[in-house]
Image (spheres, rainbow, N blue to C red):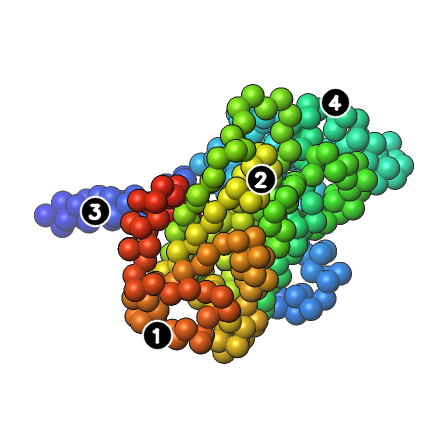
């Protein structure tokens, strides 16, 4: 009997243990920590020196599933100095997407680093020459796609800076795997694109490849229009374009309050697209109806600063839209429930009893409705 009980207990223990053991692809590693002293955040040289080790540990903790899904593998390989792996990964993604310019800057960067190591010479010179050769072989459309401006760098820097501030506030001498992944990705975007942009700016600076801002200029890197050749379908420039845009969302978190409201930037883009397509500015009638949390983007500087500690970054864009001829109307119902007064809003903004009647009235007048959400 004792022998039978012992066998049962042994089997039970084995069964329980087998259930407790993680499967090969289970992300149990997420509970692990990577040593990363908080003092590094204030020591740029030591920080840069420590990042490759962080990337290596991130790679070693990736599951097979993570690697198959690609994600930010290129960032991790490049930070770890494994440039051949980075090239292989880029080749794999390009083949899968059938897109030979996906991550092409990083591929040329990695090739240049390997050439520098093997043959010597100046990395900057190798990269710049290789990039120019590759760029000149591309179609017009692909050259446009690669001709990003410094607005993207500003975005990458803000994302990276915000993450660093968040990690510093934690006051921990370690990183979770998730934090290490995010740090590696955002550090990579900021540092590599910053260096790459300096080298390729003379190559991609031809105005024919750059985004256009024919009407609204304040919403940089949100409202740009890519130049297109060989256009077959064109709008009729003789009719009136009556546009009704509904805005309902606002991101009031962290760094977002310091940026232009996304939906408001999209309104600007739609206007720029119409004008760039050949529609005269004086043939466009624009009505913007604002309710729900989007109201916060239209507050005056004083009210915005009391709420968020900074002046309203949307104020200049809203004034530019008004100068373009936009009629901006806020919903009186939403103003009531969001505890906002007319005096809290920027000058020139109209108020309706409800957004619903503005929507029905202007749609019945023949306005084209756009739900500009984010």
Q: Is residue 22 visible?
A: no
Give the residue at x 56% y 53%: 324
Element carrying mark 1: loop
Q: Which residue lies under the disc numbered 3? A: 12
Give the residue at x 74% y 43%: 196
Residue at the far front in the pictured view: 238
Q: CA distance from mark 1 to mark 3?
A: 62 Å
Q: CA distance from mark 4 to mark 1?
A: 58 Å
Vertical order, 63 against 342 (above or below): above
- Out of 261 and 87, give the one closest to the viewer: 261
Give the residue at x 73% y 62%: 44
Element carrying mark 2: loop
Numbered tag placed on residue 137 in the rendering:
4
- Image spot of residue 320 (x, y percent): 58, 57
The mark lying in front, picked from 1 and 3, is 1
Give the residue at x 54% y 49%: 268
Q: Which residue lies under the disc numbered 1? A: 339
- Out of 11 and 53, give the one closest to the viewer: 53
Element carrying mark 4: loop
Q: Are marks 4 and 1 in contact (CB under 8 Å)?
A: no
User: Going from the N terminus, do you reach mark 4 or mark 2 first?
Assistant: 4
The mark lying in front, picked from 4 and 2, is 2
The mark lying in front, picked from 2 and 3, is 2
Q: CA distance from mark 2 to mark 1?
A: 39 Å
Q: Which residue lies under the disc numbered 2? A: 280
């Amino acid at each position: 009997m004792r022998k039978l009980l012992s066998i049962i207990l042994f089997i039970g223990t084995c069964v329980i243990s087998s259930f407790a053991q993680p499967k090969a692809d289970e992300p149990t590693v997420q509970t692990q920590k990577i040593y990363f002293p908080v003092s590094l955040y204030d020591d740029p040289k030591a920080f840069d020196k420590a990042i490759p080790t962080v990337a290596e540990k991130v790679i070693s903790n990736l599951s097979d599933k993570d690697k198959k899904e690609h994600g930010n593998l290129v960032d991790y390989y490049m930070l770890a100095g494994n440039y051949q792996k980075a090239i292989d990964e880029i080749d794999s993604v390009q083949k899968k997407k059938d897109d030979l310019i996906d991550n092409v800057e990083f591929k040329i960067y990695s090739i240049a680093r390997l050439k520098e190591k093997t043959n010597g010479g100046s990395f900057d010179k190798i990269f710049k020459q290789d990039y120019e050769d590759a760029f000149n072989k591309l179609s017009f459309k692909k050259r446009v796609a690669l001709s990003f401006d410094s607005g993207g760098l500003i975005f990458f820097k803000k994302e990276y800076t915000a993450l660093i501030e968040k990690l510093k506030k934690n006051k921990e001498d370690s990183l979770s795997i998730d934090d290490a992944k995010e740090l590696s990705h955002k550090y990579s975007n900021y540092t590599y694109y910053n260096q790459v942009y300096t080298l390729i700016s003379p190559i991609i600076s031809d105005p024919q490849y750059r985004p256009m801002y024919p009407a609204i200029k304040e919403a940089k890197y949100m409202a740009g229009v890519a130049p297109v050749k060989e256009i077959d379908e064109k709008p009729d420039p003789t009719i009136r374009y009556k546009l009704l845009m509904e805005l309902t969302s606002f991101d009031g978190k962290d760094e977002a309050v310091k940026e232009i409201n996304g939906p408001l930037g999209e309104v600007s883009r739609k206007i720029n697209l119409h004008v760039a397509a050949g529609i005269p500015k004086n043939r466009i009638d624009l009505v913007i109806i604002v309710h729900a949390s989007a109201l916060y983007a239209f507050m005056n500087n004083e009210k915005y600063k009391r709420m968020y500690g900074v002046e309203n970054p949307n104020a200049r864009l809203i004034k530019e839209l008004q100068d373009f001829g936009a009629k901006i109307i806020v919903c009186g119902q939403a103003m009531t429930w969001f505890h906002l007064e007319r005096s809290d809003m920027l000058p020139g903004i109209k108020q309706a009893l409800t957004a619903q009647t503005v929507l029905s009235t202007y749609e019945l007048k023949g306005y084209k409705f756009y739900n500009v959400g984010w």
